Image (spheres, helix red, strand yellow):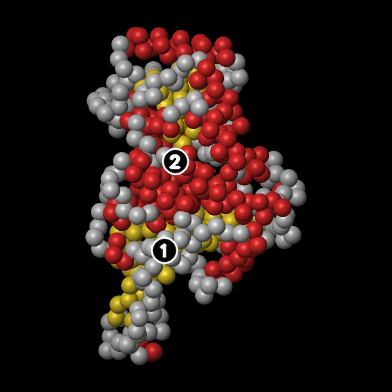
Amino acid sequence: MAENKHAEATIITIFGGSGDLTWRKLMPALFNLYLDNRLPEHFHIHGLGRQNYADTEYRKRLHEGVNKFSRRGKANPKIWEKFSSHISYCPADFAKPAFYTKLKKDIEAMEKEWEKPITRIFYLAIPPGIIEMISINLGKAGLVKDVLKNRVVVEKPFGHDLQSATTLNKKMLSIFKECQIYRIDHYLGKETVQNIMAFRFANALFEPLWNRNFIDHVQITVSEKIGVEDRGGYYETAGALRDMIQNHLLQLACLIAMEPPLSFAADEVRNKKVDVLNAVRPVTPQEVHNFAVRGQYGEGWIEGKKVKAYRDEKNVDAHSNTETFAAFKFFIDNWRWQNVPFYLRTGKRLQETISVITIQFRPVPHMAFPEESTENWQPNKLILNIQPDMGIRIRFQAKRPGLDMHLIPVDMLFDYSSTYTTGTPEAYETLLLDVMEGDATLFMRADQVEAAWRILMPVINTWAGNPSVNFPNYSAGMQGPEDAEALIARDGKSWIALPFDKKKK
Ligand code: BG6
């Protein structure tokens, strides 16, 4: 198999190697990179975890995960055999310094055998509470001394609020240089999300319209049918605002709102994105109710099946105040976006699984057509479909064929599935490859994470201090709480209706 010429010999050490993320996401992604010849000739994947597995057992379990979750379906057994010969496992107590001494020895032995410059990647697929402890131990053991070749990957959530994120950043930056830390927001690895930059900055057509003179408002919806599944314990400490808005939705907003970068160098792109976050108009505690809405699902119906209320889910408090839905409105105080509202909403156990960004343009300045021609008239919309359908849709007015002048909205559609026959890489494939190649563009820098927390702190504090009196306030299978409709209706606008008319495809 031809190897990737860009990535150097690499050892990926996964803390949390026996966990769910490794099983469902990381290993299928690494196997797909292998199938696409994107792994270097010399690579090794070393899983570390609390469970006791022999190497063969561990490989067998990962094989099952790949068969179940890989976008390519079941693995060819012969190819899997070859790939999995690069995988080993070690039961570990991450709190014991002696363990890191052994890890260092193992890694150095491999490096000696390969006689090559080696990239060391330490992937922290572990609960946030132990990131600091593992980082300290990696530092003390001298495992991450090479600034260019030793990298650490950190999963979200990065901190629990502004203070804890700042403290964690400080601690990590006393051990690693910023360029060694890859803070993952997996939305940034999604194909359609990366395409937002291509759409905006590789076309001359849209950028002149991309401002307050032409755009009325922006909406971002990430709606999920699934509930909290078996993550009740984690979710109780998070809620929709921390779990989704602080990271995924604000990052999508940055890609829509950022200024054109001079180049695609990691720091240039991240500078432009953090400028957006820093320009978000602060909300005072007194204003929170006008800018943020929370919801929690009660029991209901999803795809014809009765589903539990959030408070009845496993590991969830029967009186929980945790929000499973959040909507947030904000303004960006700069020349481009002054007074253009951005509306974000996300929730679990909603009617649809769909992620979509809508750019709503302003109405024409003067409507010359008579009223009877324009009954169905709508201002232009640009709809970026992130998932599950991937595509871009421009909605504009056209004359309906016939002897009378009737204007109706029609769509121009770029649809991935009918345009391309090649499969789309999963976000984790893109992101893991970027870590191996040392490209941090799609990862969160310390200041981005902190700026995102700073925006949300007034909401977090207000909600924590005032438990909701009306939870649950939406039934599973609906579109979320009524308050979310009110949030946008107060401004004379409405959320885009979901799902789109499939016939229009
Ligand atoms: C994760 C959240 O970051 O993103 C989950 O913790 C959420 O609660 C998930 O379900 C959504 O990701 P995706 O890629 O399925 O849209």
Q: Which residue is mark 1?
A: 337
Mark 2 residue type: Met
Residue 324 place in picture, x, y as percent: 62, 52
Question: Where in the figure is residue 467, as x and y percent of width and height?
Answer: 72, 54
For label 1, the crowd category at 10 Å Cα-Cα, with few meaning under 14, some 14 to 19 and many 20 or more, is: many
> Could you tell me which residue is drawn at 29 percent across and 81 percent down?
399
At x 34% / y 84%, what residue is drawn? 366
Task: Classify residue 33 as left or right of residue 461.
Answer: left
Figure quadrant of residue 72: top left
Q: CA distance from mark 1 to mark 2?
A: 23 Å
The residue drawn where x is 36% and y is 70% is 213
- What is the secondary structure assignment of the residue under circle 2? loop
- Looking at the picture, how far across and down is residue 56, in whole percent? 47, 17
Q: Position of residue 302 (x, y in %)?
A: 58, 56
Quarter of the figure with the N terminus: top left
Query: Residue 444: which numbered mark, if any?
Result: 2
Do residues under tags 1 and 2 come within 8 Å of each other at their CB atoms? no
Between 421 and 370, the residue placed more toward the observer is 370
Q: Earlier in the sequence, mark 1 or mark 2?
A: 1
Position of 10 relative to 229 (above/below)? above
